[in-house]
């Protein structure tokens, strides 16, 4: 059962805007559903300009600097291929723990196409993985907001999740 005593802002921080028409609509559906449970927002770090003149390491560094500015003061969870994998019920339980124990905001971060800089990894409080498979950083946005919504319905004992 959902036991959070404080209303903590939860944010999904992403690098670059979501392209196309269908994904943003589907993501927004889950964002609106989530707002019935927790204060939730998606924050976008703009795509870097002139990336052709930057190496992969330079891109990760510049994106990392922007991520670090955006997560200041927050409990930070990276969505990373090397993070811990959860079943939906276990993720709900872990989410509950983060919501109960953190007095700061809770920020989940999806990096750019090359991942995170070393400084972002060092700053992270936790890392999770949605799968051992690789997905585009665009698609992961939808998958994650759906899983976050699913976790909230599990915590409330609502019938969205069947197990």
Image (spheres, rainbow, N blue to C red):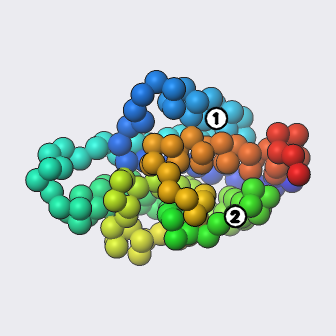
Residue at coordinates 35% horizontally, 42% vertically from top-left?
A: 16
- Using the rendered view, name the quadrant where residue 138 is placed: top left
Question: Are circles 1 and 2 on residues that touch, CB within 8 Å?
Answer: no
Q: Is residue 115 above or below residue 31?
A: below
Q: Please provide percent x and percent y for residue 163.
A: 88, 51
Residue at coordinates 33% horizontally, 67% vertically from top-left?
A: 117
Around disc 1, counting alpha carbons within 10 Å, would you say few (fewer than 14), some (14 to 19), or many (20 or more)?
Answer: some
Residue placed furthest toward the front: 133
The front one of 139 and 68 is 139
Left-right relation of 138 to 39: left
Q: Please provide percent x and percent y for residue 147.
A: 67, 48
The front one of 97 and 8 is 97
SS under mark 2: loop
Residue placed furthest toward the left: 53
**Of callouts 1 and 2, which one flags the residue occurring earlier in the amino acid sequence?**
1
Q: Which residue is mark 2?
A: 86
Left-right relation of 162 to 87: right
Around disc 2, counting alpha carbons within 10 Å, would you say few (fewer than 14), some (14 to 19), or many (20 or more)?
Answer: some
Q: Please provide percent x and percent y for residue 18.
A: 42, 36
Residue at coordinates 53% horizontally, 48% vertically from top-left?
A: 140
- Using the rendered view, name the quadrant where residue 65 is placed: bottom left
Left-right relation of 11 to 34: left
Left-right relation of 120 to 156: left
Res. 104 visible in picture: no
Q: Is residue 84 above or below residue 35?
A: below
Q: Please provide percent x and percent y for residue 33.
A: 69, 33
Q: Which residue is mark 1?
A: 30
Label placed on residue 160 = none
Q: Is residue 162 above or below residue 131?
A: above
Res. 84 visible in picture: yes
């Amino acid at each position: 059962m959902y036991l959070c005593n404080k209303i903590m802002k939860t944010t999904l921080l992403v690098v670059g805007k979501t392209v196309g028409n269908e994904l943003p609509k589907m993501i927004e559906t889950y964002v609106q559903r989530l707002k019935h449970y927790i204060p939730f927002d998606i924050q976008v770090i703009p795509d870097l300009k002139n990336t052709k003149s930057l190496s992969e390491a330079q891109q990760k560094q510049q994106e990392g600097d922007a991520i670090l500015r955006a997560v200041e003061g927050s409990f930070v969870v990276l969505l990373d291929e090397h993070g811990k994998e959860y079943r939906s019920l276990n993720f709900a339980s872990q989410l509950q723990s983060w919501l109960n124990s953190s007095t700061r905001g809770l920020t989940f971060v999806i990096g750019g196409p090359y991942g995170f800089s070393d400084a972002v990894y060092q700053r992270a409080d936790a890392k999770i993985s949605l799968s051992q498979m690789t997905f585009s950083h665009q698609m992961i946005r939808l998958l994650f907001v759906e899983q976050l919504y699913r976790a909230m319905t599990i915590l409330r004992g609502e019938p969205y999740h069947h197990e």
